Amino acid sequence: MSPAISIRDLSKTYESGFQALRSVTLDIAPGEIFALLGSNGAGKTTLIGIACGILNASSGTVAIEGHDTVSDYRAARSRVGLVPQELTTDAFETVWATVSFSRGLFGRPRNPALIERVLRDLSLWDKRDAKILTLSGGMKRRVLIAKALSHEPTILFLDEPTAGVDVELRRDMWRLVRDLRERGVTVVLTTHYIEEAEEMADRVGVIRGGELILVEEKTRLMHRLGGKKLTLQLQEPLREVPAGLASERLSLSADGRELVYSYDAQAERPGITRLLDGLLAAGIGFADLRTEQSTLEDIFVAVVHGDDAR
Amino acid sequence: MNLHAIAAIYLFEMARTGRTLLQSVVSPVLSTALYFVVFGSAIGSRMAEVEGVSYGAFLVPGLIMLSLLTQSISNASFAIYFPKFVGTIFEHLSAPVSGFEITFSYVAAAATKSLILGLIILATSWFFVPVRIDHPGFMVLFLVLTCVTFSLFGFIIGIWADGFEKLQIVPLLVVTPLTFLGGSFYSIDMLPPFWRSVSLLNPVLYLVSGFRWSFYGLADVGVGLSLAMTAAFLLLDIAVVAWIFRTGYRLKK
Ligand SMILES: Nc1ncnc2c1ncn2[C@@H]1O[C@H](COP(=O)(O)OP(=O)(O)OP(=O)(O)O)[C@@H](O)[C@H]1O
Ligand SMILES: [Mg+2]
């Protein structure tokens, strides 16, 4: 199947001379949920802005379902919904008016039943006649989502949809994304909450300094980079790892009270039995033990801050 | 052509006009009425007739032009500047609409508003002075052309402006002086020859002159020339807008 979004050698240098994107190439498959991760200023919003036609690219191309976003912008843009990072809404319009306006702007005929469904889905129905300036921040974000969904896009960009929203709205958002996936909508979202990517995304891309430094399926990524850790709390502090057990996977904490063993849970022989046998044989007793699964967050931190990724 | 988008923007703008009806209609009507009271009645009674037309009636076309020009510019410039200022312009830029469609709908809305305003002022003037319209067809033509041309001009200012001062500066420093010196309140025949020649460099003169001709058959310059100058200014506006959308000037970074 041809990609829903196809980005080729995309670079962006702002007028100030700052280069925000460096030759980004990325394909996103139809129906995929793609999470774009990156620190503040990494270039996520810039990438989305170019894909949606808000910013001009310096070089490179973006195609939406095969339609170039510059030469064939009508076909490209009519398929795309955008929920921007900033809460930019009209103030004096009613919720109903502003959402209906968006539908018209994207060239769709009036459809009150659909607008009603969108507003109900987002728990905005009761607020349909309220002026936007009377809404709370979280509701304004829902209004922006409703606007983006009003014209039935097949591709939705969510730029930090859960920044500054409460737990409930966050769960709602996750549910919404799952619903959209069921309807076959492709979703690209950016977020700083990595558990969110872990929760929702099929694939994860990490952008650093305008460069896409990693794109991988979430499960494979977590498998590859995310091992498990077994921590043993020793009864008596050790000065060094016992000679017979020494391996690169085993390390001793600075105070000598904890042995940390890293292993891959999926491996055929994680080596835990051998470790415990070894400890027993050496007469090392332990008071407690715990295991931890490294999260996407650990992986993210390692990738973004580690130099090995470059 | 994205007709739904044109309708959406146009209706959005007209709804906004509806909400601000008081300030957008009442204040120009009030100021025009004051002009009639001060210039028409108080001073005008001491002024001679201008080529058989009472001074009060002579003022009507010029005053309408004065309001049309300033209102068209301020309506259209504000309409496009505001979404830029608060950021909601992102939606227009991300929508499948062309520059032409955006311009057309904003300008049509601003021009409609000015047109309504012009007609209201015309109706108001009927209460104060004996107005006569010799060439109604031309009157409407000049009215519409002026509304469209200056709404388009205002639209350009709104895109160019990156602050509220700039939004004010052109109407204040350029348009108002040109209107006052463009024969709104007098026939340039009343001026010494030198100033008469200088006045001919003022584009607004041609508008006022043509418009007044459609009322009373009085003109400082030929009506054909008036029409040609208005059309030329309109074409210039269109060329500038076309360039703006081709380059993304001040709209896209
Ligand atoms: N209009 C602009 N002119 C100059 N530089 C800009 C402009 N907009 C953004 N930048 C710079 O481009 C870089 C990328 O910005 P961008 O908004 O894409 O980051 P981001 O990944 O979305 O960050 P955040 O997580 O904070 O939203 C930043 O360093 C920013 O300062
Ligand atoms: Mg951002």
Image (cartoon, helix red, strand yellow):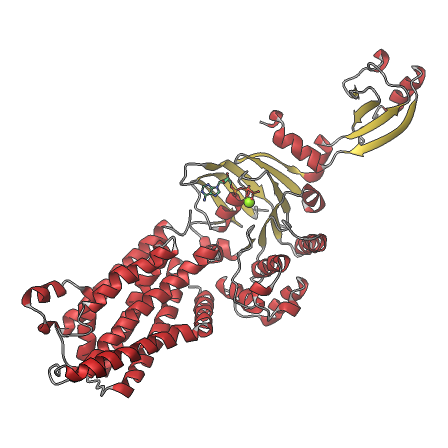
Relative to B64, A284 lies left or right:
right
B75 and A148: which is toward the camera: B75
* Residue displayed at 51% across by 57% down: A78
Q: Is residue A153 left or right of residue A244?
A: left
B85 left or right, relative to A230: left
Residue B4 point in image, percent of width and height:
47, 67
Seen as rendered, the residue at the extreme top is A243
Viewer-proximal residue among A178 and B116: B116
Between B214 and A80, which is closer to the camera in this rendering?
Answer: B214
For this orientation, the residue located farthest to the left is B193
Q: Position of residue A171 (x, y in %)?
A: 72, 53
Report x, y in % for residue B245: 36, 54
Q: Quadrant of the N terminus of chain B?
A: bottom left
Q: Judge whether B55 appears above or below A155 on screen.
A: below
Looking at the image, how many numbered discs can be counted on the residues?
0
- Nearer to us in this view, B30 or B217: B30
Q: Position of residue A298 (x, y in %)?
A: 70, 33
Q: Is residue A258 above or below residue A30?
A: above
